[in-house]
Image (cartoon, grey):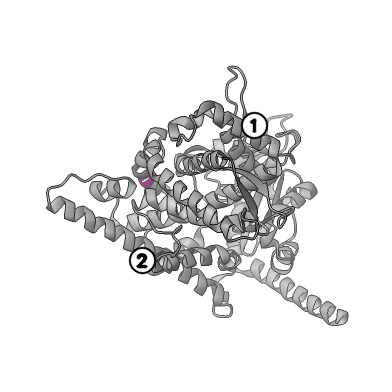
Amino acid sequence: MAALGHLLKGSVRLELEGLARGFHQFPVMQAAEQALERNQAEVVLGPRTKGAPMVKSLNDMPGPSTLANLVEFFWRDGFGRIQDIQQKHTRQYGRIFKSHFGPQFVVSIADKDLVAQVLRAERDAPQRANMESWHEYRELRGRSTGLISAEGEKWLNMRSVLRQKILRPRDVAMYSGGVNEVIDDLVNRIRKLRAQESDGLTVTNVNDLYFKYSMEAIATILYECRLGCLDDKIPQMTKEYIEALELMFSMFKTTMYAGAIPKWLRPIIPKPWREFCRSWDGLFKFSQIHVENRLQQIESQLNKGEEVQGGVLTHLLLTKELDLEEIYANMTEMLLAGVDTTSFTLSWATYLLAKNPSIQESVYQQIVQNLEKDQVPTAEDVPKIPLVRAVVKETLRLFPVLPGNGRVTQDDLVLDGYLIPKGTQLALCHYSTSFDDKCFPAAEEFKPERWIRSGNLERKENFGSIPFGYGIRSCIGRRIAELELHLLLIQLLQNFEIKVSPKTTTVLPKTHGLLCPGEKINVRFVDRH
């Protein structure tokens, strides 16, 4: 068996070596590398001030070989360990390094000051990296891009329209009532689920519960309707959407393969692209049904001479600032972006509070001191409980939902002495910077108090942890996500003391598109009253 395993590994290694050579022979790869070399030559050959440091080229930049990357990701399941590979490469190659991923050339940035330099150099419409497969699907199906996948002027226009209802704190505050109704259902669901366990306290796999909460809450805001995710019997259409959404996230590797595998290989390896398209078909179908349902309701109200009121979707349908295809795309992409991101953060926050009872008690005491007994909090109450916000920030530092982010340079840029030509893909390594002790002393520890400002000190930006991004291309749904997180954590602690179940010990993260728990988190919810 050992000999067979060695033979198989040797065979795969030869195939990967061939694939690595094939990628470099691929015309797109050759063109990209030649363009980078031309761009560098044009800039570096200019006059240099005497005594000024020589600008280095990408050829001088360290990094893993193409073969090493292919082995790491395709043979050693690197797609599930992206956060670990980030840290490994940072230790090996330093705060800036290059790599080839299939036909893609990427420069990785693993230093908060360099990340800040990149983000502050962006124009009015920053360009994201690695969206080719999303764009290709939309062209294939005749679908519009949405706020996540759009670029340039189209993206700017969409953002200016959508920001009116979901970016400003005072606009988001109006959704407190709807979110609190979902939270009430969640608390009742917790009581039902734990009653089914032998100890009467444990909820197994809290992320499944938080997934349904996040989907219900974001749909309440975006679609202005309830989906029934927390009901005893989930409606069939909602179940189908949940399955499509789970398919999208469960197929992260497939999605990565779809982007990494050149088109000429698809006839030989058709499954990744086929399943990628199938999952998007399900997501768009669900959004289209709910958008059209709301449109019919609005038309009925207008025909009766009734005043029409509502939230995001109603605003878009009434103003017609976006066409229907653009509305379908934005509802689809925002719902996709707003479910697992919130649910994973809630899972980690619950886990960390359960593992750190003294911190949990401090947060609870702050809630008791600032809210009346049985008071249902709203957005206006959250600033009274800064520890809750600190818990969320520290959770996102330790477990950033996106361990990395991508950009494409819009101009030539000199970083750490290296010339990065216009059009280069950059990977911002947020996981590595989050665990840099220079940014965060005792970085491995859960210390929410590090985010509490004392006195009148001015707020300082720390690019070591920017879970919602920075600047104009930062997460437009940040305020909504924070509302869902803060209100739920407050009410969970009002109702329960959270304890780790004996079924759960230490949970480590894995990458599955997003940074998620590597195993189920089981939690005991003990009544406080």
Where does residue 183 sit, x and y in percent of width and height? Answer: 46, 47
Q: Quadrant of residue 171?
A: top left
The magenta region covers 156-160
Q: Main secondary structure of the magenta part?
A: helix
295 inside magenta stretch? no
Label ID, residue 287: none
Kindly identify the residue that appears in the image at 25 percent across and 56 percent down.
295
Give the distance between the C-alpha atoms of the residues marked 1 and 2, in whole angstroms. Answer: 53 Å
Residue 56 visible to the viewer? no
Q: Quadrant of residue 227?
A: bottom left
Q: Is residue 494 left or right of residue 379?
A: right
> The N terminus is located in which quarter?
bottom right
Mark 1, residue position: 362
- In the structure shown, which secondary structural element does the residue marked by tag 1 occupy? helix
Where does residue 59 sit, x and y in percent of width and height? Answer: 72, 51
The vertical placement of 389 against 340, above or below, is above
Q: Is residue 181 left or right of residue 246?
A: left
Please tell me which residue lies in front, 464 or 131.
Answer: 464
Mark 2 surroundings within 10 Å by alpha-carbon count, few (fewer than 14), some (14 through 19), many (20 or more): few
Kindly identify the residue that appears in the image at 45 percent across and 43 percent down.
480
Please tell me which residue lies in front, 48 or 23.
Answer: 23
- In the structure shown, which secondary structural element does the residue marked by tag 2 occupy? loop
Kindly identify the residue that appears in the image at 72 percent across and 62 percent down.
69
Q: Amino acid at mark 2?
A: Gly
